[in-house]
Amino acid sequence: MASLARLRSRLPLTKSGRFAPFVRSLQTSADSTQLTQSIPEDGSTPFSVKLHEDSFRAYHTETPSLEVEVTKDSLLKMYKEMVTMRRMEQSADALYKSKLIRGFCHLAIGQEAVAVGLESSITKDDMVITAYRCHPFAVLRGGTVTGVLGELLGRQVGMSNGKGGSMHIFTPNFFGGNGIVGAQVPIGAGIAFAQKYLERPTATFALYGDGASNQGQVFEAFNMAKLWNLPCVFVCENNKYGMGTSAERSSSNTEYFTRGDKIPGIQANGMDIIASAQAVKYARDWAVSGKGPLLLEFVTYRYGGHSMSDPGTTYRTREEVQRMRSTQDPIRGLQRYIEEWGVATDADLKASSDAFPPYLLLALDKAAKEEIDKAVEEAKASPVPKTEDLWTDIYYKGTEPSAMRGRERGEVHVY
Amino acid sequence: MTTHSIAPAVRAVRRLSPLTFSFGARRWESTGAEPPPAGGHLPSIATSKILRGTREAALRTPGIKWLDEGGSSPLQNTIGGRETRKMNVYQAVRDAMGITLSKDDTAIVFGEDVAFGGVFRCTMGLAEEFGRERVFNTPLSEQGIAGFGIGVASMGQTAIAEIQFSDYIFPAFDQLVNEAAKFRYRSGGQFNVGGLTVRTPTMSVGHGGLYHSQSPEGFFMGASGLKIVIPRSPIQAKGLLLASIRDPNPVIFMEPKILYRSAIEQVPIDDFELPLGRAEIVVPGADLTLLTWGTPIFHCETALSLLSEPPASLASVVPESARGARVELIDLRTILPWDIETVVESVKRTGRLVIVHEASRTAGVGAEIAAEIQSKAFLKLHAPVRRVTSWDTPVGLQYEKFIIPDAIRVLDGILETLAF
């Protein structure tokens, strides 16, 4: 089959037999947004920037506006969040390699603009559910780095009390990661139904990957959401590989934003944080205004392997990874905006002895590193779950069977 | 139904080579049995003494808990003034959902064709009464239905999903086992889907064949976090379904489909619950424990009648000494988590256990119960735990009555266990 995939042309043939792309491809550079007006002094005053004209593609709808209003404060906040998320994932990588984190662990290094862009454009009352690459969402949705790392380490301080692990982290408006590929998507449709039924003007964002997009239940969820006009945004994080299989080898249609049949779709540059945030804003407005579901595909990239046991270099070249890191990194892209547009405020500059804008970013980097280092220590210091927690939260307290078996012969927990 | 099921089973036994299936000698002697007279003397579902056909008997259902209007008022335990109505199982199920929809604004009922009343009429008129935004049809997508219901329940709503036949629950197996059962645990108690109840018709109907006569309860036995409930009668269906809907854990409620119309009782019209996780001793006894759930309870009742008063055609295979045996008949009702205490206590008294279920034997629920009983009551057992179950074959259309255990096979199991 692999040879079949290789044989298949990625580009359609025209009548004359020559290759010709039938659509313009999406721009995935992280730093193609242009400043269109002079930048205001005040950190909270909005100013306009213009996204690259190929930042979005649309299916059965209009593309989001390329004119975006941002503020200095929002850009710096996004920078801080992206850097913190990357640091957190890097620390998880180190903890895994030092054998403190065991089991399965999927890192989102390279995909920060999706999680941070999503969170920057939704409210606390919107709901998010995603798959196993869930750590940044858990923190941004109201969790803590300590809570996430503690969960990865399997400690009491973990957000699921150390019993869930990497894929099972929840907050009140974040319905968790999920280890079953695609299983979270119909659940997201159900959450969106409840929002509509309870007459809450909010949206659910159900995320999945390009690999999961071929699961049957994803299409079942699409159908129900469109049939019942649910305020659900199906977000496909297309990082181009479902584990080790590239999108082209797994999907007959790799235009994931077009796979909702009657559900309109948007494809967005998931490496440019401003484009990501704009796409989410558009999607949220769409769902909340009663237009029903929408597909939102982020074209993004993961630098690491699928999980910690995958070096990530057997199915793609090191050069490819290196090229993405050096040319399309979302954090470096935003850094360039901040530097070129003069986003650092006077106050920021005054606070530094060195009146050179990158100093501010270095300070943010340093603050993120300190935050993560502190969280790592807190998480490591937390004890493993109590023995009796082995039996808690299986059934609702008081409705469980009178006793349940434990780990060893003769070990029975009596409720 | 049971009266008619004996003859084909016996005939089928005669046709098959003894090498194919090994029976005790008694079975072979019984092959000459004539079918009992039409409408004969054996109890059937229509004449079952297990069913509560009077108001007084219905109101005295053991374990009944009344949940009257006005949650603040103390529970009324009096039964005076309460009314009952004659209902079959589908009407009782419909009644329970009607009570839920009228008392709980967050409750929704959904599934394939439920807005039209459902293929077994369990949701007749609910859409008209409570609105199509609360009682609605879904696409034919079981995995999606389960996932959708889990999502709705995770938001705190009461979600009552129907899987049209329990044979169709397998596409939803992942959602039920990996999501519904584990939601509370894996979120550290932050989320749960306790509001989810999945109703599904189960067990054989006599001619359902491969995809309409299965009993999949055993597949869920390892899914701690789920509850599995199977009622035997209209009163049980209403009380257990209301308890299942309100139980703060996800429940799979399997309704024996042959009983939808055939089992009829006087059912209290008020809101009441019957306890989950509790088996019921339906017929007390001291010599042997006969444990079952759902449809086979009526085959068991017939078997007990055959045991105490065998018809002439069976008299030669039922020893006089066995006829006076007092058999304790237990309805397990909740399959997961099952009532170990009641069953163990019973077996410790009787020393003998026969488990009857419609699912096939290998790794069926009976296997788990047998293993638990031998570990908890080993020194009290006078005979090996006996399982009377379907064969380990698919439920073939023409052989259905042969595959599903009937009263004769239950009787055979009782006799062998008594004589061990």
Image (cartoon, coloured by chain):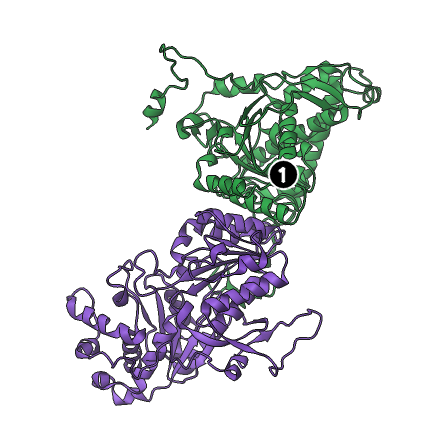
Question: How far from the left and from the top, in percent, is residue A28?
Answer: 56, 20
* Residue A396 falls left or right of residue B163: right
Res B294 visible: no
Secondary structure at numbered mark 1: loop
- Answer with the quarter of the image where residue B205 lies: bottom left
User: Residue A271, relative to residue A38: is it above or below?
Assistant: below
Near-viewer residue (A281 or B234): B234
Question: How far from the left and from the top, in percent, is residue A38?
Answer: 77, 14
Q: Colour of chain B?
A: purple
Question: How far from the left and from the top, in percent, is residue A177?
Answer: 56, 42
User: Residue B216, relative to residue A41: is it above or below?
Assistant: below
Q: Which residue is situated farthest in the front direction here?
A: B128
Near-viewer residue (A174 or A324): A174
Near-viewer residue (A365 or B246): B246
| Amino acid type, residue under disc 1 in the picture | Gly
Residue visible at 80% across and 15% down in the picture: A355
User: Disc 1 sits on a residue from what chain?
Assistant: A
Chain assigned green? A
User: Residue B66, relative to residue A384: is it above or below?
Assistant: below
* Residue B311 falls left or right of residue B357: left
Res B133 visible: yes
Residue visible at 26% across and 74% down in the picture: B6
Q: Which residue is mark 1?
A: A290
**The C terminus of chain A sits in image quarter:** bottom right
Question: How far from the left and from the top, in percent, is residue A227?
Answer: 52, 42
Residue visible at 73% across and 27% down in the picture: A74
* Residue B34 falls left or right of residue B246: left
**The N terminus of chain A sits in image quarter:** top left
Q: Residues within 10 Å of mark 1 (few under 14, many from 20)?
A: some
Near-viewer residue (B255 or A392): B255
- Answer with the quarter of the image where residue B38 lies: bottom left
